[in-house]
Amino acid sequence: MAKDSISRRDFLKGMAAGAASIVVLGGLEGAASLGSGASESSQGGSAADVSVEANGTTMESVAETVKEATKAANGLTFTPGTYTSSARGIGSDVKVEMTFDETSITAVKIDASGETPDIGGKIASGMENAILSAQSADVDAVSGATVTSDAIKKAAADCISQASGTEVTLKEEDSTASGDWLGTAPEIADADIKETIDTEALVVGIGTGGWPALMTLAEEGVKTYAIEKRENPTGIREDIGAIDSRLQQEAIKEYPEFAIDKMEALQELVRYSGGYIDSDLAKVWINESGATVDWLTDIFEGSGKYFMSLEGGVGNISDPGRDKAYATGHSPHKTEEFANDQSVTTNSTFQEYIDSQPGDVTIRTQCELVKLVQDDAGKVTGAIALDTKSNTYVKINASKGVIMCSGGYATNTEMMKALQPQTLDMKVNYTLGSTCDGSGIKAMMWAGAALDPTHASMMFNRCCVKPDETAGYKTTGKWFWFGEQPFLKVNLNGKRFCNESGPYEFMLHSMVMQPNHTYVDVFDANNEKYCEQFDEVGCCRLFPFPNGALSNMPYSFVWGKIEELIADGYVQKADTLEELAQKLNIPADNFVASVNRYNELCAKGVDEDYGKEKHRLTPVDTAPFYGVRTCAWHLTTLNGCRINTDMQVIREDGTAIDGLYATGDCSGGMFATTYPNLMTGLACGRTMTFARHAAKQVAMR
Ligand SMILES: Cc1cc2nc3c(=O)[nH]c(=O)nc-3n(C[C@H](O)[C@H](O)[C@H](O)COP(=O)(O)OP(=O)(O)OC[C@H]3O[C@@H](n4cnc5c(N)ncnc54)[C@H](O)[C@@H]3O)c2cc1C
């Protein structure tokens, strides 16, 4: 098959050359109305070569003529018929069906229904039109849904290849891209604003931060408007971190090791971040999170549908490892009576609470922030948002202030490339992750906010790829919850390279220093016993905690998923180490030597190579042996716009932007370099604590 790249630009260049015989009298304006293919040609500067004879010629027929000339110029001819192809998206195989006549694509049908419903799942019809009018697979990806877009483009290119008998490749990413991820605030004319809303407080984004902000504003009797870009608000997460909650104080009586020294906690946070945090801000979490979790506990338990539990685990204190764990995690669980009632959720519980409070709170979904509005003095007085159902702009005036709870920028590839490219090397695409695209951060920066000087993410070492794949943001991975268990791990040369026991990201950061940013997890027939012996804390624990609290995932469930991964060709199973190495595509001699050395250290009970604690030195000596290539699951980003201790968004000079508050992943000052996951639930704990604090400040204005 001949190889032919038909990027849209090349395609249009060809079109201009081939259309030279068509005479245009109507000028560029006429050409621009010919549909997107022709209008692109005018932007590309080629339309000057194309002229249109106006006398008696309809625009439709001109369009048709240009289209015909375009096809001929492109040089591809097709065997008429319908062709199908598919490519891996983020959660499914995306299917594309394309119909061709001899010279053109006549129909495109895309099935992306297995993708995240309100992200990749909703871009199909837009991409169908784009491919049809460009007559090419090389169309622009949809921002925030780049993985699904790329899968569609790949499958479309394959359909074109099949129909033309020519191998069509997609245009390489433009490495000379400007890197200007911030850009400037869009201009929205007053005439384009179809609706104006007056309120006291505006909350942007309803997830872990938005809900507590709304509940607090409702309690305080503040008239509040909230906008959320998705069809439904995001829920809160399972683990909420706090110090000094009532539940903790109670548990400490029986488990004194659960006690947390607040000054020690602060020193830990500073050490984890290499000093790149605002210690005073961290102290707000340390000092106020206990009361915030008590308040949440009262709301949950007051509903009669949930109870709160403390995840009481600090690991094996008689054999401590390098990194200390803290019993900070709190989890809401449904009561037995409502356990199977799907209509009861944390969101429905919060909504009921809001409805019971004096404040008038209106939630509007499918409405996304476009930019903030400021007065001449720079005070934020509201925002302009886009109602994505009607595609019209709404202006919201907020007399008391705006609280930004709009999350991070994990799905904004341009921002990720500019701010933390190493994360793109470690991660694979996986459905369950933040859907936020940095739009809130950009809006705050346009209003003058300072961005954190360093950048951080929350990643779990719990995704896997097949033996012929490696990590990277263009690869789609699978859920591999076992990945955090501190079993032996080797690089793709079959060599052990670090202490496998510690915060999730330490393992991943060590991995990014290794070839192809991917490692291999190795375990054997005794893995269940070893998982229990590891005495893990936080969300990766697979057995109940010492105080009886349930783990997020039980071993039996996780092992069931591993059986599926074996069937799907991800996890490899073998009777010998040599066979396992061969199945994993890694050098058998190095691998067997690494396992032998590791087993020797396990027998000694001392990790002379990397210092792993004794109770986590478990041998790999009983068949069947298992192995899998592991990489990062990117949950969210954790750096954002700087805030002060009242959650006011600040400028580079430290002054507050009047009327603007932020919490959660769009706010900064709290994390750098890595996420300290051994303080379980810290991300949610600080998001909720700061949200309540910000809402109280706004209420007082
Ligand atoms: C799968 C998963 C599990 C996690 N588990 C835990 C855990 O157990 N414990 C923990 O501490 N942390 C956990 N985290 C991290 C934690 O969820 C975040 O750090 C925290 O939720 C941040 O809350 P947030 O309010 O900033 O963002 P989110 O909860 O993501 O909410 C942001 C909301 O803003 C909306 N939005 C975005 N842009 C706009 C816009 N322009 N206009 C309108 N709305 C907008 C989004 O749609 C979203 O609903 C987890 C993350 C993920 C992805």
Image: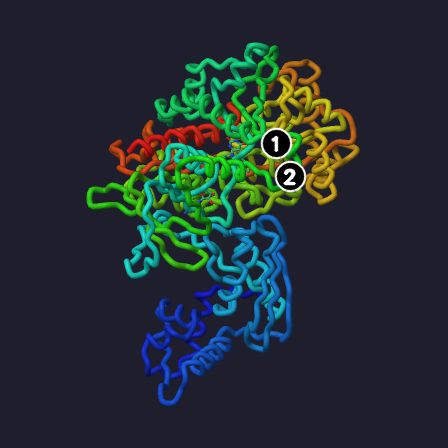
Q: Which amino acid does the dot numbered 1 rest on? A: Lys
Query: Depth check: 82 or 356 in front?
Result: 356
Q: Can see residue 495?
A: no
What's the residue at 74%, 34% (across, down)?
A: 578
Can you give x and y, in whole percent of width and height, for residue 28 in the image? 33, 75
Query: Depth check: 28 or 229 in front?
Result: 229
Mark 1 and mark 2 lie on one chain; the one further toward the N terminus is: 1
Left or right? Give the position of 694 relative to 344.
Answer: left
Can you give x and y, in whole percent of width and height, for residue 470 in the image? 59, 42
Can you give x and y, in whole percent of width and height, for residue 294 in the image? 49, 23
What's the residue at 51%, 28% (across, down)?
A: 240
55 lies above or below 133: below
Can you give x and y, in whole percent of width and height, for residue 425 in the image? 51, 41
Q: Quadrant of the C terminus?
A: top left
What's the residue at 39%, 52% (across, down)?
A: 177
Q: Residues within 10 Å of mark 1 (few under 14, many from 20)?
A: some
Instruction: Please tell me the numbered disc located at residue 693.
Output: none
Query: Depth check: 395 or 105 in front?
Result: 395
Left or right? Give the position of 205 relative to 614.
Answer: left
Q: Which amino acid does the dot numbered 2 rest on? A: Asp
Q: Circles 1 and 2: CB distance less than 8 Å?
A: yes
33 lies above or below 360: below
Judging by the rendered image, the residue that carries numbered circle 1 is: 334
Q: Can see residue 305?
A: yes
Judging by the rendered image, the residue that carries numbered circle 2 is: 341
